[in-house]
Image (spheres, rainbow, N blue to C red):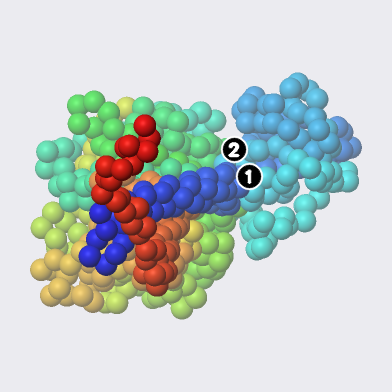
Amino acid sequence: MSPDPDGHDEGAREMLVSRYPSRVGRYVVVVLGVLLAALPVLPARAQAAPYVKYYTVESAYAGKPEGLRDIAERFLGTRDRAEEIFNLNVGRAQPGGGALTDPSQLRAGWHLVLPWDAVGDGVERGSLPSPSSPSARPPSGGASAAPPATNPLPRPTLPSPSPSPTPSPSGTNKPGSGGAKCGTATRGDKDRADWAERRMSPERAWSRSRGEGQMIAIVDSGVDGSLAELRGRVTQGMDVVAGSGRGDVDCLGTGTAMAGIAIAQSGSKGKVTGVAPEATVMPVRVVTTKAESQPADQAAGIEVAVAAGATVIALGSYVDPNVPAVAEAIATAVKHDIVVVSAADLESSDPESGLPDRGMLRVGGIDGDGKMAASYRAGGVDVVAPAVDVASLGIGGAGEFVGSGTQYAVAYAAGQAALVRSAYPNLSAAQVTERIRSTASRTAETSEDPASYGDGVIDPFTSVNAAMESDGGAAAPNGPPAGDSDSSTSGGQVAIFVLIGLVLVAVTVLSVMRLRTVLRSDDRKDPEPELDAPAMRPADPSDAQRLR
């Protein structure tokens, strides 16, 4: 080995450089091993417990032991739905270590999940209590239970409905159009009415949200629950006019058309598709065979929706928000964090001062040319949506029909609210309405007359994809952004990758510094003198002679 100009041995340097990285490698392996071992114990993203309706079994009710059929009759209006309750609860761990396996065997303190349309004293809303904490209630003769801790506001009690001005149609105990007294929807020009669906293009928003987990209460004429496009997405609901009975019956057709716009399932032959096809509709019937409703029934319909756990309430054309009792019911719904969507006031309206400013959405209607569908009160419109020559579902097997009315604009906005609530479950009702308004699109017509058009035409796609400062950090998207299938990595995983990268950078920097320190220390040492080979004297001839 030859020394370099500074007197260092190149071999020594090469040996130092070759050995030192192996130590660094061991350090890196140790650090990475510690990080990987810590991954399982890192806190996972908190997931909210399911929000359900449930009932805590009592030791006795009205002097008799509790039974599934009695519970079904009390909260669902029919003993025939006991099997539905059984299927929702079979096998799940209950307080005390038991589980429901026999429909005839119930224990006090068990928590029974109920269908969403269950209504009555004792029905509680919120996260299901842990089975480790028994909560048996003492026998009651039917007295109301104390409000649950998960529902800070007391449930409204339903006022007695006013007498119906007309008798209820026959067959109201079955889903459908209600019997021979009910008419059928008018068919229209479907090609001419496609403009509304094309204008809204809700399918563009479905990569983010399809309305999963949301229940839209439609307070109108009921909904024909027998239609294939709505099957499995319409609850039994309630007939407020009769005071009991089902709401999945419709004689006038407006409620069914609203449901079709909001949640209809796509079918063959280009049938109507709803804005939020995975949401559920709860029909609340406030009219039967005549297009006239009583103020008490209108208010009661909203209160039924609140008690049933609706996340969005769509008010049809038979509900007047400016009636004091109705305005009070709307305020109660918003206090319970429910988005309320209603038709905008007409010019002739006398606005009620008690209506909430936030959490409620007032919708005006437009036609295919963007013109207003009616003369709305200036300043009384928040957003606008299609309302003229709109295609939807008809009752009584009539198929598709075309209709006009601001209630259809309400249905579009209600479906959009379900999309937003599903995509951003942490947003309050006020934040949902603000997001819908802020993402509405401006057109030439809306820019010329903002007082009539409000914030513009609703935009389902932008409302579930736009980043907004007004959410105040509460918006936690429920899924990856549209078109970004690779962004599903959780925040915890990203943090780990960043931490590993920082550790690697730190180890590299320390390695370089350590190497430089060793080399500088070697520079300060004096090179060791090399020993000369012993001098050889010339051969002497006399030495050879001596050896002889």
Give residue 511's position: percent from left, percent from top. 41, 60
Which residue carries the number 1 mark? 53
Front-most of residues 473 and 330:
473
The quadrant the C terminus occupies is top left
Q: Please name the residue shown 36% across and 43% down the image.
A: 210
In the image, taking residue 130 as reference, residue 184 lies left or right, namely left
Quadrant of the rendered structure where residue 275 is?
Answer: top left
Q: CA distance from mark 2 to mark 1?
A: 7 Å
Give residue 428's position: percent from left, percent from top. 48, 63
Disc ID at residue 433:
none
Q: Please name the residue shown 33% across and 57% down the image.
A: 532
In the image, taking residue 191 as reference, residue 515 lies left or right, namely right
Q: Mark 2 or mark 1, which has the lower sequence index?
A: 1
Mark 1 and mark 2 in contact (Cβ < 8 Å)? Answer: yes
Disc ID at residue 115:
2
**Above or below, 163 relative to 340:** above
Give residue 342's position: percent from left, percent from top. 38, 61
SS for dot 2: loop
Front-most of residues 502 and 160:
502
Residue 494 visible in the displayed image: no
Q: Residues within 10 Å of mark 2 (few under 14, many from 20)?
A: many
Front-most of residues 134 and 444:
134
Give residue 472's position: percent from left, percent from top. 43, 70
Q: Please name the residue shown 30% across and 50% down the image.
A: 536
